[in-house]
Image (cartoon, helix red, strand yellow):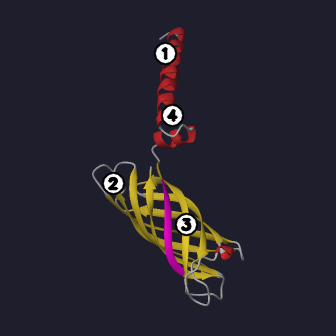
């Protein structure tokens, strides 16, 4: 193989890859980072959720109904093992005196980083994907507080890229506690 022959083959390969990547990029959200994740051996999935529940937003106000809304994502790095994070907001849904009323003035932020394990990673032949998750949680606002979270759930894949998500999750720190039944969607 001569040097000129090698250069011509390399240029043709690079041009073909650029054309293939450009076509792929147009059909997959148009971002290079999405493209890099889609072509890598690491799988990824994102999710959005709404979680009615109970808990304490502030140490001395226990047992109030609340709503947790958020979203996140994770990279599935090895045989069902995942690493990810999420962010959302929690607002009390009932006042201390009783009755149902949304208390937006007492809303706090909640973010977490987690490890997860997907027992049967979703594929074309497996519609059910149970998982467990746990990790670090940070409540921010009135006051900031670090804690932990644990949960378990199920993705029910309706096609290759969208699943219905059902999950139970508890997030706890010294000042705050949020328990919720999450209903949402998972996508990849």
Segment colored magenta: 46-54
Q: Nearer the viewer, mark 3 or mark 1?
A: 3
Q: Is residue 84 left or right of residue 80?
A: right
Distance between mark 3 and mark 2 Cα atoms: 23 Å
Q: Residue at the location (33% across, 54% down)?
A: 158
- In the image, taking residue 18 as reference, residue 96 lies left or right, namely right
Label pair 4/2, CB-CB below 8 angstroms: no
Q: Which SS class for mark 4?
A: helix
Count of number-bearing discs: 4
Residue at which label 3 appears: 69
Q: Is residue 60 above or below residue 36?
A: below
Residue under circle 1? Answer: 9
User: How far separated are the C-alphas under marks 3 and 4?
Assistant: 30 Å
Q: Is residue 51 magenta?
A: yes
Q: Secondary structure at mark 2?
A: loop
| Label 4 or label 2, whichever comes before in sequence order | 4
Separation of marks 3 and 1 at Cα, in angstroms:
52 Å
The tag on residue 161 is none
What residue would you read off at disc 2? 158
Residue density around tag 1, few if under 14, some if 14–19, many if 20 or more, within 10 Å: few
* Most common secondary structure along the magenta stretch: strand
Seen in the picture, residue 58 relative to 119 is either above or below; the reply is: below
Q: Residues within 10 Å of mark 4 (few under 14, many from 20)?
A: some
The first of marks 3 and 4 along the sequence is 4
| Residue under pointer 4 | 25
For the residue pair 46 and 103, the one nearer the viewer reads as: 103
């Amino acid at each position: 193989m001569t040097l000129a022959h090698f250069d011509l083959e390399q240029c043709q390969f690079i041009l073909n890859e650029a054309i293939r990547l450009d076509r792929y990029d147009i059909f997959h959200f148009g971002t290079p980072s999405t493209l890099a994740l889609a072509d890598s051996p690491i799988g990824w999935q994102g999710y959005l959720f709404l979680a009615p529940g109970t808990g304490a937003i502030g140490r001395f106000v226990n047992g109030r109904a609340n709503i947790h809304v958020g979203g996140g994502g994770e990279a599935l790095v090895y045989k069902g093992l995942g690493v990810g994070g999420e962010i959302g907001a929690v607002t009390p849904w009932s006042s201390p005196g009783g009755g149902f009323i949304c208390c937006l003035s007492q809303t706090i932020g909640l973010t977490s980083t987690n490890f997860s394990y997907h027992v049967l990673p979703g594929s074309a032949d497996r519609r059910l994907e149970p998982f467990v998750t746990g990790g670090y949680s940070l409540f921010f606002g009135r006051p900031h507080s670090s804690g932990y979270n644990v949960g378990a759930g199920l993705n029910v894949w309706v096609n290759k890229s969208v699943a219905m998500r059902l999950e139970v999750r508890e997030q706890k720190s010294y000042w705050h506690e949020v328990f919720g039944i999450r209903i949402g969607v998972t996508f990849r």
